[in-house]
Image (cartoon, rainbow, N blue to C red):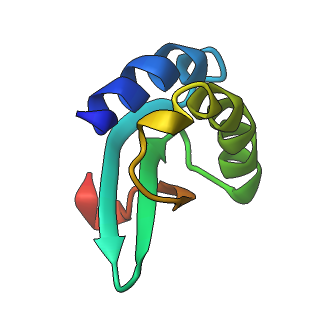
Amino acid sequence: MITNKVRALIEEPLKKINVKLVDVCYEKEGSMYFLRVIIDKEPFVDVDTCVSATEIINPLIDKIEEEFDDSYVLDVCSMEKGDK
C-alpha cells in the first residue's frame, strides 16, 4: 500500500527535526487525490513546522512518484486538539 511506503520513507527523517508522524492518508476528495501527512510536535505544530516537514517530505516522495496512480496534492497538517 502506498501509504505504508510513504510512512517508511518519511518517519525517520521527520524524527530528526522532532516531528512525530501521526498518520498518512491517500484519499480522493471530489475529483482530487490528497496525500495527507498528519504530524505532531511538542509543544505545538506551527506553520514553520509544516513548512520544514514539507521540505523534507517532498524530495523523498518524489523518489516513488511513479507508484501513485494519479496526481495528488501533498497536505502536511497537524492533529486537532480533540484528536489526541
Q: In this view, does 71 lie above or below 23?
A: below
Q: Residue at x 34, y 78 (%)?
A: 29
For this orientation, the residue located farthest to the bottom is 30
* Number of marks in picture: 0
Left or right, residue 63 beside residue 22: right
Q: Residue at x 44, y 58 (%)?
A: 70
- Relative image position of residue 51 (x, y in whole percent): 74, 48
77 or 69: nearer the viewer: 69
- Relative image position of residue 8 (x, y in whole percent): 39, 18
Q: In this view, does 61 lie above or below 49?
A: above
67 or 72: nearer the viewer: 67
Q: Residue at x 28, y 28 (%)?
A: 4
Left or right, residue 14 beside residue 31: right
- Relative image position of residue 1 (x, y in whole percent): 22, 33
Find residue 33 and report its image quarter. bottom left
Left or right, residue 10 beside residue 29: right
Q: In this view, does 31 lie above or below 8?
A: below
- Relative image position of residue 66 (x, y in whole percent): 50, 36
Q: Which residue is drawn at 44% across and 63% down?
A: 34
Left or right, residue 25 beside residue 50: left
Find residue 82 and report its image quarter. bottom left
Find residue 3 and report its image quarter. top left
Q: Is residue 59 above or below residue 68?
A: above
